[in-house]
Image (cartoon, grey):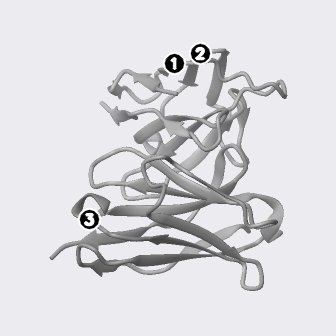
Amino acid sequence: EVQLVQSGAEVKKPGATVKISCKISGFTFTDNYRHWVQQAPGKGLEWVGLVDPEDGETMYAEKFQGRVTITADTSTDTAYMELRSLRSEDTAVYYCATGLRFPDYWGQGTLVTVSS
Amino acid sequence: IVMTQTPLSLSVTPGQPASISCKSSQSLLHSDGETYLSWYLQRPGQSPQLLIFEVSSRFSGVPERFSGSGSGTDFTLKISRVEAEDVGVYYCMQGIHLPRITFGGGTKVEIK
């Protein structure tokens, strides 16, 4: 069974950095990309970016470019998303997911709250 | 690419059909011959789950009452007979242009 288990909720101050993890099990880790998707409270889904675990190549949505870094550790089958210079608009649930051109399996989500 | 879903919300009697439209601002037909349009359901309080990929392929474990169709820029998700567990928000998503993956705004489905 494919499982994606994300790290717990975070509360950060404006300007801080958050790093979320996503542990994947149940299939060959390097098979698919690792995506990250943002969902602000009461809003829809917004794609953040992805990493190819096979070679570490990353792609980011223009909105997050320069503030986000997505990585994959093949030794622990874990993907990470680091978001810097946090602002109140970054308050959201962040989901990791696997897949190539479409996320198929999703994690349970991690709530990041940015508040002074 | 802008993904436009209609309607914004839908109230359906159990056992009746439902249909959601998704239009893209550009063709989703890739040069490899595939069309990268997928559909997701997000039930209340849950993570999104994949229903349909590449326009019409049902993901593992998805009931047959869900079907997808369309081509180019116009796509439709149909539920042949809505059940109580189908309540939630449905999203379409295009994956043709990496890194510009985009989702539709969502369609909320409720039971009458």
Badge 2: few (under 14), some or many (20 or more) residues near its Cα, within 10 Å?
some
Q: Nearer the viewer, residue B109 or B55?
A: B55
Q: Nearer the viewer, mark 2 or mark 1?
A: 1
Q: What is the x, y in percent for residue B17?
A: 49, 21
Whether callout 2 and callout 1 share a subunit is answered yes
Q: Is residue B59 above or below residue B18?
A: below
Whether callout 1 and callout 3 share a subunit is answered no
Q: Nearer the viewer, residue A17 or B102?
A: A17
Task: Tell whether A14 sits left or right of A2.
Answer: left
Q: Which label sits on residue B73?
A: 2
Q: Which residue is mark 3?
A: A87
Badge 1: few (under 14), some or many (20 or more) residues near its Cα, within 10 Å?
few
**Of callouts 2 and 1, which one flags the residue occurring earlier in the amino acid sequence?**
1
Report if residue A27 is visible in the image.
Answer: no
Q: Is residue A39 above or below residue B64?
A: below
Count how many numbered circles sit on residues in the image.
3
Q: Which residue is mark 1?
A: B25
Q: Which label sits on residue B63?
A: none
Q: Chain of mark 1?
A: B
What residue sits 73% from the left and 67% below the top? A56
Tell me the CA gap for discs 3 and 2.
Answer: 35 Å
